[in-house]
Amino acid sequence: MNPIWILHTGRLVLTPVGGADLPELSQLKSDPLVFAVMLGGVRSPTDIAEELARDAIAWGANGFGIWAVREVAGNRFVGIAGLERRPDGRGVALRFALGQAAQGRGLAREAAAAALRFGHDSAGLKRIVAIARESNVGSRVVLGAIGMTECESFEQNGYAMVMCESVRR
C-alpha cells in the first residue's frame, strides 16, 4: 500500500479499504439507518464483498478510492469516506458514511475534509462533486462546512437530490 494513501487528522486515521475491513463494512453497509440514503441503498453481503473488491482495485487504477475511517484513540472503525467515479457520469464524487455511534461528533466533517483535500492536493482532481438527498440535512451541512457549494438539483429514483462541487483551479 502506498503510504501517501494513509491520511491522519486530529482524531482519525483513514486507510484504503481492504479485506480485513469486510466485517465492519458489512455491519455499516447493511444498516438501514446509515446506508438507506446512500446511492444504491442498503447492501447485501454479496454486494458488499463485490464493492470491496472494486474499491481495492480502484486504488491501483486511479490513485484514489474509499478509506476505512478509524478513531486514533482505540483504533475503532467508525465508517468510510472516499472518492469514486459516479456511475451516472457526473464526475468523481466524495462519499462518506459513519455508523450511528460515530454520528453527531464532527467526525464525518473531519473525514470528508481529509478526503476532499487528498482529492485535490494528492490525486490532482480539479473538480470533485458530492450528491445528497435534499432531505439529508446532516450530509448537506457537512458538505457546506468543508467548502463545497451547491451547483445542481435533480431527481433520482423518486428523490430530490442536491449536487455540490469543489473546484480548484
Image: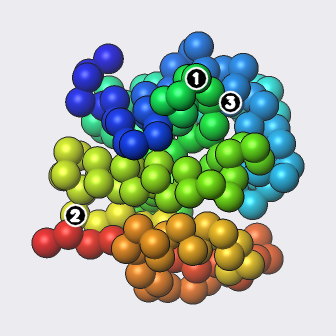
Horizontal and vertical percent position of residue 81 = 51, 45
Q: Observer-nearest residue: 128 or 115? A: 115
- Disc 2 vs disc 3: Cβ atoms closer than 8 Å? no
Disc on the earlier residue, 2 or 1: 1
Q: Which mark is residue 25?
A: 3
* Amino acid, disc 2: Lys
Q: Is residue 117 above or below residue 9?
A: below
In this figure, which residue is indicated by the disc labeled 1?
A: 74
Mark 2 vs 3, N-terminal side: 3
Question: Residue 136, image x and y in percent?
Answer: 70, 72
Label 1 or label 3, whichever comes before in sequence order: 3
Residue 126's label in the rendered image is 2
Instruction: Give the secondary structure at mark 3.
Output: helix
122 or 93: which is nearer to us? 122
Nearer to us: label 2 or label 1: 1
Label 2: element kind? loop
Tell whether label 3 touches label 1 (CB within 8 Å).
Answer: no
Q: Residue furthest front?
A: 73
Mark nearest the camera among 1 and 3 is: 1
Type of residue at label 1? Gly
How many angstroms separate mark 2 from mark 3 (CA)?
29 Å
Q: Nearer the viewer, mark 2 or mark 3?
A: 3
